[in-house]
Image (spheres, rainbow, N blue to C red):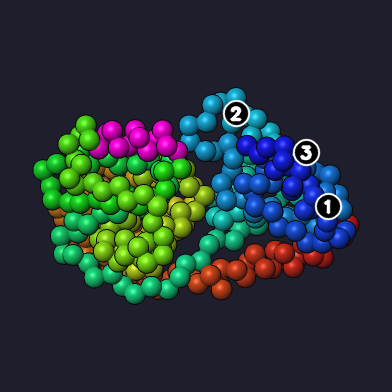
C-alpha cells in the first residue's frame, strides 16, 4: 500500500537508470504499482521476483484482494522476466495471470551444525511473523488439545499485525497454556540460531507460503517439521523420505493429531529425524541457490528490445 511519495521515489530511481539496464524489482514493490512499473518496462530490461502473490495474503478484504490481483497482473505482464521462489508458486502465477513463462529460483540456506535432540521431542518452536497467514492461532488451538502431554512451545517472530498478535496472546491466556507457550517477539542473529539449536520440532501452521525458508533453516540443523500443506512448503520439506509431516492448513484437529503422534510415538520421531538428516544433506547453499537467478538475469540481458 505505497504512498504517493513512495511511488515518486520508485519512479525517480527507475528513471535514473540507463536505457536497456537489467533491473530486478521485488514483487512486494513492483506488483503494487503497475502505473510506475509499466512505463519504465518499455525501456528497461525489467524482472520481478515474486515472494508472495499479493492477493494471497490471509485475511484481506475481497475487494482489496481483487484490486491487488489486477495490479499484480498488470505489473507482471509488463515485465520481461518473472521469477518465483518455488515451482508451486510459478504454476500458480503463470496460470492465474496467463504468463508465457515463469522462472524458479528457490532460496538457499546457511550450513549449520546438527541440533542435539531431546529424546522425548518436547521442545517445539514456531518461527514466523505474527500475521494471520502464519496461523499461530491455529497452533495454540491445536495445543489446547494436548494438555495431557508434556511439551513447551516458543513462538519467535515480530508482531507485524498487532491486532492478530493480541488475539494469539488472548488465546494463550484463555487456554491456560501461558506457562507452556512463550512469545519471544522479534528474534535475530544468535538468538534465532539458539531457537533452532534448542528445538526438537519446527511447527509452521501457515495458510499460505510461497516457499517457507524457516523449514529449510530447521532442516539444516536436522530438526524435523510439521507444517501446513500449502504452496512451496512440500518442496522445502522434500520428497520421500520427507523431512516432516504436512497437514491441511487451518485445521487445528489435524495439527493436534500430528503433534500428538510426534510426542507419543518414539519410532515415528526417530523416523522423522532420520529423514530430516537426509534432507539436510540435500539442501543447497545460498551460493548454489543464486545460480538459477543469475542465469535468468543473464538471459534477460540478451532480450531484444
What kind of element bears circle 1?
helix
Residue furthest front in the image = 5
Residue 296 position, x and y percent, is 70, 63
Q: Name the residue under label 3.
A: 35
**Residue highlighted by disc 1:** 15
Query: Which residues are drawn in magenta?
Result: 161-172
Q: Say what secondary structure mark 2 lies in.
A: helix
Q: Mark 2 points at which residue?
A: 64
State which mark lies toward you, 3 or 1.
1
Query: Could you tell me which residue is drawn at 16 percent across and 64 percent down?
Result: 119
129 in relation to 295, above or below: above
In the rendered image, the quadrant that contains the C terminus is bottom right
Q: Position of residue 91 (x, y in %)?
A: 59, 48
Count the labels in the image: 3
Instruction: Report if residue 163 is visible in the image.
Output: yes
Residue at (69, 54) in percent of width and height: 25
Dot 3 and dot 1 residues touching (CB under 8 Å):
no
Q: In which quarter of the image is the N terminus?
A: top right
Q: Residue at x 86, y 60 (%)?
A: 18
Label 2: how many Cα within 10 Å (few below 14, some 14–19, many 20+): few
In the picture provided, is 148 more to the left or to the right than 258?
A: left
The reply, left or right, for residue 160 in relation to residue 73 is left
Lower sequence index among marks 2 and 3: 3
- The vertical placement of 90 against 294, above or below, is above
Which of marks 1 and 3 precedes in the sequence?
Answer: 1
Q: Nearer the viewer, residue 55 or 171?
A: 171
Residue 80 as seen in the image, left or right of residue 136: right
Percent x, y of residue 276 = 33, 65
The rendered magenta stretch, by its main secondary structure, is classed as: helix
Q: Relative to the observer, which residue lies in front, 277 or 111?
A: 111
Q: Nearer the viewer, mark 1 or mark 2?
A: 1
Amino acid at each position: 500500500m505505497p504512498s504517493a511519495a513512495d511511488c515518486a521515489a520508485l519512479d525517480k530511481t527507475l528513471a535514473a537508470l540507463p536505457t536497456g539496464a537489467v533491473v530486478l524489482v521485488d514483487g512486494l514493490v513492483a506488483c503494487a504499482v503497475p502505473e510506475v512499473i509499466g512505463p519504465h518496462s518499455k525501456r528497461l530490461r525489467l524482472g520481478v521476483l515474486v515472494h508472495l502473490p499479493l492477493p494471497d495474503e490471509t485475511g484481506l478484504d475481497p475487494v482489496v484482494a481483487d484490486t491487488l490481483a489486477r495490479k499484480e497482473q498488470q505489473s507482471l505482464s509488463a515485465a520481461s522476466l518473472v521469477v518465483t521462489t518455488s515451482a508451486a508458486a510459478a504454476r500458480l502465477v503463470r496460470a492465474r495471470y496467463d504468463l508465457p513463462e515463469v522462472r524458479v529460483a528457490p532460496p538457499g540456506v546457511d550450513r549449520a551444525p546438527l541440533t542435539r535432540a531431546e529424546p522425548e521431542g518436547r521442545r517445539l518452536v514456531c518461527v514466523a511473523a505474527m500475521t494471520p497467514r502464519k496461523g499461530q492461532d491455529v497452533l495454540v488451538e491445536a495445543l489446547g488439545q494436548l494438555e495431557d502431554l508434556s511439551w513447551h512451545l516458543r513462538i519467535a517472530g515480530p508482531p507485524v499485525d498487532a491486532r492478530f498478535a493480541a488475539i494469539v496472546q488472548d488465546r494463550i491466556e484463555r487456554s491456560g497454556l501461558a506457562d507452556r507457550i512463550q512469545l519471544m517477539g522479534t528474534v535475530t542473529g544468535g538468538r534465532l540460531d539458539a531457537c533452532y539449536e534448542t528445538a526438537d520440532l519446527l511447527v509452521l501452521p501457515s495458510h499460505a507460503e510461497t516457499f517457507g525458508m524457516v523449514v529449510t533453516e530447521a532442516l539444516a540443523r536436522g530438526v524435523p517439521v510439521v507444517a501446513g500443506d500449502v504452496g512451496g512448503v512440500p518442496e522445502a520439506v522434500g520428497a520421500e523420505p520427507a523431512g516432516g509431516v504436512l497437514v491441511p492448513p487451518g485445521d487445528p484437529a489435524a495439527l493436534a493429531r500430528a503433534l500428538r503422534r510426534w510426542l507419543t510415538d518414539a519410532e515415528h520421531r526417530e523416523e522423522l529425524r532420520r529423514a530430516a538428516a537426509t534432507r539436510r544433506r540435500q539442501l543447497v547453499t545460498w551460493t548454489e541457490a543464486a545460480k538459477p537467478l543469475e542465469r535468468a538475469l543473464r538471459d534477460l540481458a540478451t532480450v531484444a528490445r
